[in-house]
Each structure stands twice: as C-alpha cells, then as structure tokens.
Amino acid sequence: MISNPSRSSDPRPAHRHTELQALGLSPERMQKAWLRNERAACGDADCLRGLYSERIRYLESLVRSGIAERESVRVEADP
C-alpha cells in the first residue's frame, strides 16, 4: 500500500491512532495483530484496498463509541 500514493498520504489512520490512545487503547498492539492476522492474508492490491477501507471504518467506529461512552459518563456525573 505504501507504493500507492492515494493510500500512503491518507491522514485518517494517524489521526485515529492519536484518538485511540486518548481513549486508553493500545493502537500499536492492535495494529500489529491486524498486520499479522488480516493484512498478511491479502495477496493483491484489490484485497488490500478493501481491507484498508474496512480497517478505517472499524477504527472510526471505535473512536465514535469511545467518545460517546465518555460523553455519557460525563453527562451522568453532572448534577
């Protein structure tokens, strides 16, 4: 994927990485497992494109659910 400029310049994964860390998750460990288990199974660019898009959606859902959970805790704590 790095050789594909349309993907290598995509800022979303780096941004999600920071957000996941702020939520107390370990994006480094998550990424290593994903590379080992998911990405390694792809053999061509089409497979990688689909897997990459799926991964971004997954990370975005983690961030959204984590932010929503934080907001609900904050609201419950307010008098």
Image: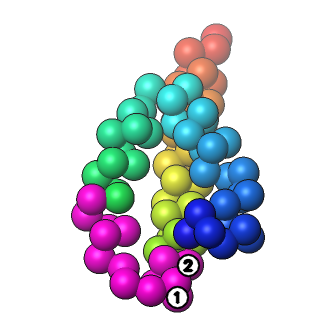
Q: Eyeballing the image, is 57 above or below 66?
A: below
Residue, disc 1: 46
Whether residue 72 is visible here, answered yes or no, is: no
Give me the residue at 41% from left, 33% from top.
25
Q: Which mark is residue 49?
A: 2
> Residue 11: percent from the left, percent from the top?
72, 51
Which element is circle 1 on? helix
For the residues labelled 2 and 1, the Cα–Cα distance comes to: 5 Å
Looking at the image, which is closer to me, 74 or 3? 3
The N terminus, quarter of image: bottom right
Report if the CB atoms under discs 2 and 1 are less than 8 Å apart: yes
Q: Is residue 32 left or right of residue 27?
A: left
Give me the residue at 74% from left, 70% from top.
6
> Residue 55: percent from the left, percent from the top?
49, 64
The C terminus, quarter of image: top right
Amino acid type, residue under disc 2 in the picture: Arg
Q: Which mark is residue 9?
A: none
Q: Range of the magenta residues?
A: 36-49
**Residue 71 is one of the magenta-drawn residues:** no
Q: Is residue 6 left or right of residue 63?
A: right
Point out the residue furthest to the left here: 37
Give me the residue at 33% from left, 48% from top.
32
Q: Quadrant of residue 5?
A: bottom right
> Residue 30: percent from the left, percent from the top?
36, 46
Amino acid type, residue under disc 1 in the picture: Asp
Q: Eyeballing the image, is 35 above or below 7?
A: above
Count neighbours of disc 2 (C-alpha within 10 A) and say few if under 14, some if 14 to 19, many if 20 or more.
some
Q: How many marks?
A: 2
Give me the residue at 37% from left, 68% from top.
39
Whether residue 73 is visible here, answered yes or no, is: yes
Q: Eyeballing the image, is 77 above or below 19?
A: above
Question: Which of the colour schemes (rainbow, by chain, secondary structure, one colour) is used?
Answer: rainbow
